[in-house]
Amino acid sequence: MNDKIGLIGVGFIGKLFVDSLTEAGYQLTVYDVDASQMAYATERGAEAAESPGDVADSSDVLLFALPGSPEVEATMEGADGVLSALAAGDVVIDATTVRVDTAVEYAGRCRDRGVHFVSAPLTRAAPEPGVHMMVGGPGEDYEAAREIVETVSERHIRFEDVERALRFKYALQIRYAAHLAVDAEIVAFAEDSDVDPRPLAEFLGMDVSERLFEDDFEQDVEGIGGLAIWDKDLGYALEAARDDDTAMPLTATVQEAYK
């Protein structure tokens, strides 16, 4: 059992990780740029660190739960960053949805140091409840991370490398974002037409989010916010699509709507 776990990012997803890890009895060290966020973890027995590097110094396994590529890059780099503090045999599990290039770069730099690295973006919006992770990395890295992945998620699926895991997550985000955007327009259209949209769900059984019927279109998610998450992740998907010369006109239109 890997007893010493480090967590960087104690936002909405990070708090879920805190609950899972502390309930499982792990020794947990946390860091967040917003010091007030760490109170949630310290109240549950975690130790607060002063920098990402301090977390890496005191941990065998590191979990990232950050907003996106810029935050992962800032966490990894610099004198107080994670890279300078990692030791051979350590494990990095990045649960952040990042650009493919970000994951590939840090997977390689960790490998050069004898550190295991997996990309493990997640969703909580699947029909089945709980955290579902998409874990990408070579077999040895996956096995090193598996214990903690299984602790913080209800289910996970494994991909052979970080790029495939992230591209799968992008595909999922395209579906979620487009579905939500269309449903929001349908509800707004019905209401502006003086028609009650609720029978879409109550009569026809369609999975239209209840909050749209309450005129809650913001999707208020702790951290950067729901609308910004869709904008960010669809942007990453479009970048990947350009690399493949894949035409994505609908996704581009949906991203513009979220902007």
Image (cartoon, rainbow, N blue to C red):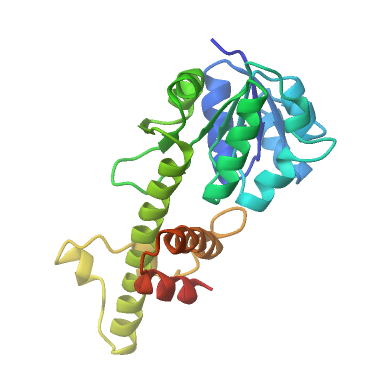
The quadrant of the rendering that contains the C terminus is bottom right
Specify the quadrant of the image occupied by residue 161.
top left
Viewer-proximal residue among 180 and 241: 241
Q: Is residue 21 above or below residue 174?
A: above
Q: Position of residue 1 (x, y in %)?
A: 53, 10
Q: Nearer the viewer, residue 76 or 60?
A: 76
- In the displayed structure, would residue 147 be above or below residue 153? above
Residue 23 percent coordinates (x, y): 53, 21
Q: In the current view of this chain or complex, which residue is farthest to the right?
A: 79
- Residue at x 30% of width, y 77% of height: 186
Residue 61 vs residue 208: left or right? Answer: right
Instruction: Using residue 203 as the reference point, say whether residue 31 is left or right of it.
Output: right
| Residue nearest the viewer, comparing 24 with 196 | 24
Q: On the picture, is 256 further left or further right than 200?
A: right
Q: Tell me if I can see residue 123 in this picture.
A: no
* Residue extending farthest top: 1
**Quick check: 124 left or right of 27?**
left
Q: Residue at x 38, y 47 (%)?
A: 168
- Residue placed at 62% from the left, 50% from the top? 69
